[in-house]
Image: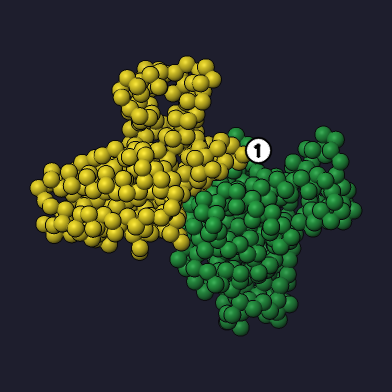
Chain colours: A yellow, B green
Amino acid sequence: MADLRGGIDLGGTKIQAAIVDRRGDVSGEARQPTPTSGGPEDVAAAMATALREAATAAGVEPAELAGIGVGSPGDANEQTGVVSSARNLPGWEGSFPLAEVLAKDLGTEVKVGNDVQVATEAEFHLGAGQEFGSLIGVFWGTGVGGGLVLDGKPWLGRGAAGEIGHVVVKRGGAKCPCGRKGCLEAYAGRSAMEAEARRLHEEGHKTDLFHLMEKHGKPRLTSGIWERALDHGDHLAEKLIERAIEALGTGIASAVNLLDPEAVILGGGLGVRFGDRLMDPLLAEMHKHLFLDEKPPAVRVASLGDLGGAVGASLLISR
Amino acid sequence: MADLRGGIDLGGTKIQAAIVDRRGDVSGEARQPTPTSGGPEDVAAAMATALREAATAAGVEPAELAGIGVGSPGDANEQTGVVSSARNLPGWEGSFPLAEVLAKDLGTEVKVGNDVQVATEAEFHLGAGQEFGSLIGVFWGTGVGGGLVLDGKPWLGRGAAGEIGHVVVKRGGAKCPCGRKGCLEAYAGRSAMEAEARRLHEEGHKTDLFHLMEKHGKPRLTSGIWERALDHGDHLAEKLIERAIEALGTGIASAVNLLDPEAVILGGGLGVRFGDRLMDPLLAEMHKHLFLDEKPPAVRVASLGDLGGAVGASLLISR
């Protein structure tokens, strides 16, 4: 039992928990929707529920785990276990001692790390990045996050490296959920895309996006709703996805021009869902801005899929 | 004598040579204008002339040097000594065995490296970056080059990292000398700035830039000419410098969001000349796009000045 670790990926839309062994194999998993109101305590309670369900599926008690790693958005301090400024989560503008609260609730050690960085390391060690020595992880979901592995090791900078979603793709451009202008995330983050779709819909542009959302009982435009809309040939959805791909190609090319890594791994809810389908247009957009266009990096879709974040989080325990 | 190394910084405007001891002190230096016509052979001949003059000033023969390092634009292969695609230099679209040709001419070992990377390492070891563990070097001159030192070591990627001049600041924006659109260099590189000034002047915008250039007998808009125009309150020069600073602030902020380094070192002909004078507007522009704006990196002007490139090149010999 001591060989089993828990991993929790805390996303803006859902909480994914997994029970993982030393080889990275998953013996139980569960998910919960991320609360859309309340505060950090409510989010922590939903995380504990997801972890308990995953433990039950694996036939283990949470307290028997060697520990639980949490991949968190915002500023996740690995030393203190405190998470600050997780602005995609309800009421989490300030600081909250997430590791301490969860450890007390679940009866085992809890460590927190940056969600996207741990998912990048998971792909590097266990997933689509195994054959490369350096890579940029790009996680395209509610926001656009990034993680870096250079020369086989995580590059964290002063603790906040990897924010590829806030690489500027257009000076003076669209307003980003972070409050600044022209960031990659302002065009490609699912939150920003939904806001733009809503604005255009209210202006009178036709789209089935919101009809599909209601029909399928979703509280927001999920990756699945975007896919259905594309499958139906929804023109507005196509336009906004194309705009996202243009921004992703531009921002990724900028990062590649700066770092010249061996590979780019595309993950996240939208990245995993659309990575194969939209790989060619993405590569074409990147190519427009690659300084060494005859020597592009490999671009791969994250292979650990939806579970990559939770598996990566579990790696925090063996560090 | 064996303790003395030669260093040559091959720039788009001038060739700077220096004779450097093990502590980084310069005992002789000389410069030559970079040929604006001809081909790689002519550039190599001018480099040899500059190095011979510097050696004479230091009271040493070139053949007595422990070796000569060359910081080169384009794709400089440290292993083979071949320089390819140095598009800022005349007739240098292809490959040229620069190290071999110079070694035969000067009678000692010659090594080539990327000009901006060696200048960044010089600032890290001997200059404005000595107190930091990680930094981005930004060299603002004819083009905009960059170099990276992460965790005390150069980060070269697959050999071409650091191209901050080709980080996109505006998707679909101005045409860059590299042929792509919206790169930082398209707004801030001196070549691009001169082309834009010329275009606006021909359109009828008033400026003293070209009058000053002729009066001082310069073949192009040098950093000194730009400074004189600013001193005279030339409106068009002010506008173009402001545009360059906006682009620099945006591109540097994107790089900082991705790498979260301890420091940014601003060098290059324009960077050294304007670094102090324009530091406040540069920081203000960066600040608009920094994801962690409460924790900006230190920004310092390169302290090895015009000689930094040549001194950095000489470090290639002790590697």
- Image: A105 above or below A186: below
**B316 and B232: which is toward the camera:** B232
Whole-percent x, y for residue A295 in the image:
46, 45
Residue nearest the viewer, comparing B189 with A235 = A235
- The residue shown at (49%, 71%) is B319
Which quarter shows the N terminus of chain A?
bottom left
Q: Evaluate whether residue B279 shows in this view.
A: yes
In this rendering, would B124 be left or right of A38? right
Mark 1 sits on what residue?
B174
Picture residue at 69% right of the left edge, 57% below the top = B280
Position of A271 with respect to B225 (left or right) is left
Residue B70 at what x, y percent from top left?
60, 64
In this view, B61 is above or below B11: below
Q: Hey, which quadrant is residue B10 in on the image?
A: bottom right
Q: Residue furthest front?
A: A38
Q: Residues within 10 Å of mark 1 (few under 14, many from 20)?
A: some
In the structure shown, which secondary structural element does the residue marked by tag 1 occupy?
Answer: loop
